[in-house]
Structure formats: C-alpha cells, structure tokens
Image (cartoon, rainbow, N blue to C red):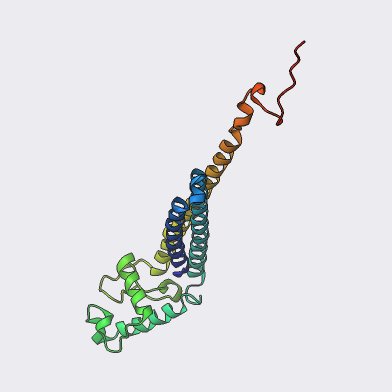
Amino acid sequence: VGRGPAATLILVCAAVVVGYVVTMRSAFIAPHVKEQLPSAIVFIGTCTLTVLGSACMLCGHLCAQRATLSASAIAVECPFADATRSLVREAEALRVARIQPKCAEEPTVARCAGYRDTWEAVVLEAMESEFGCSTFCYSSLGLTPRTLFSKANYQVSCQMTLVRHLEGFLADVGNQMYYEGFMLVLCALGAAFFKVSSACAQTPARLLKSSSDLDYGATQPFVSYR
C-alpha cells in the first residue's frame, strides 16, 4: 500500500492547522475585517473543512484502492506478483536454511549461519508473530507449513492471512477515511449554505422605514396652503 497516502494526509493536516491559526489571527487583527468578522470566520471555517475533507477523501480512496489491488494480486498470483516476488524468494531461502540439521535445532532461523537481516526477512518475521501463520505462499508452492522464526509451525497460510488483513482492515480504514472526508465537505457546504441563506433573508434597514420618513431630494416637499 505504501506510505504515500498517510504521509500526504499528515502534511495536509499540519498545513491546514497552521493556515487556520494564521488566517484567524489575521482576521481578528486586521481593522478592515473586524466589521465583517462573523462572515470571515464562517468563510475561513468552510475553507478549512473543505480542504481537510478533500484530503481525507483522496487519501482514503487511494488507501482502499491499493489495499484491494494488493490483496487480489497476493491471493491470485502470490509467487509471481511484483509486490510479493522478493518475499517469496526470501521465504524459500530461509526455508532451505531452516530444514538444515543444525538450523532445525535453533529456536529461530535468525540464529542460523548465513542469515541476513533484510527487509524481506523483517516482514516475514512480523507476519509470523502478528498473524500466527507460517511460510509465505507455501500453498502456492506446495511447501509444508513450517515457521521460520519459531517452532510453533502454524498451519495457517501467511498468504491468505495477509489478504484478509488487507481487505478487512486497510481497505476498511480507507473507506472510513473517505466517508469522513465526505462528511467534512458536506458540513462545509451546509455552513456556507446557511450563511448565504441568512444573509439573503435579512431585510435592508432602508426598507423598514416608513414612506413619510424618506427624503427624496434636497428641497422641501411641496405643501399647499389652500
């Protein structure tokens, strides 16, 4: 899935908070804005909610889409997918090392000769400990389930466990983030609508004056003395 959507959302949230604080401070200080301060506050608030909601919608959509595509690729073509090919190679290399007589006696393959602490090895160890599974993509390669970093020898496939995690957690988080952003944008539109409606509903003060109080010229009105 990557860190792109999460990093983008964090940066946007930080920028929105800083921009909101600076703009609100300027609105309270500027003398020409004080006369229309309520309208300025509503405008700043709606803009803030719109930007924040749009960022949540975009990042949530990307997160859900990438999680769904990754889960589909892992479930269908785990040994050959671009995202999992390096993990499969590392899992196979560690499995070969694990079945060696000297390594089989160790509690973890990390203590065996030739072990390298690569990124793929760290991911495989994390999946085994977090998901309680064994041997990544072993069902696709016809391998016997065997844990690499413990002697638990779980019978659950790390492949399908990862698929369920992507579909049931990451994709769900992305969808929730998308709908949260949609609600923020909807709230901003609602606030703007009510502000415009209240402004249009206000009756100008000059229309409340009686016709006798209106002075249409510089001269006095004509008065007949007959």
Residue drawn at point x = 30 percent, y = 69 percent = 129
Q: Nearer the viewer, residue 206 or 52?
A: 206
Residue drawn at point x = 62 percent, y = 30 percent = 206
Name above or below for residue 73 compared with residue 52: below
Where residue 200 appears, as percent x and y from the top left, is 61, 36
Q: Nearer the viewer, residue 25 or 51?
A: 25
Q: Given the current orientation, which residue lies at the most extreme bottom position?
A: 114
Whether residue 21 is visible: yes
Name above or below for residue 153 compared with residue 38: below
Q: Nearer the viewer, residue 187 or 2?
A: 187
Q: Nearer the viewer, residue 3 or 118?
A: 3
Quadrant hosting residue 125: bottom left
Where residue 64 appears, as percent x and y from the top left, is 49, 60
- Image quadrant containing the C terminus: top right
Side of 18 where 189 appears, left or right:
right
Where residue 171 appears, as percent x and y from the top left, is 47, 59
Side of 162 where 196 appears, left or right:
right
Name above or below for residue 133 compared with residue 187: below
Side of 212 where 116 appears, left or right:
left
Q: Given the current orientation, which residue lies at the most extreme front position?
A: 225
Side of 152 where 90 appears, left or right:
right
Name above or below for residue 16 compared with residue 96: above
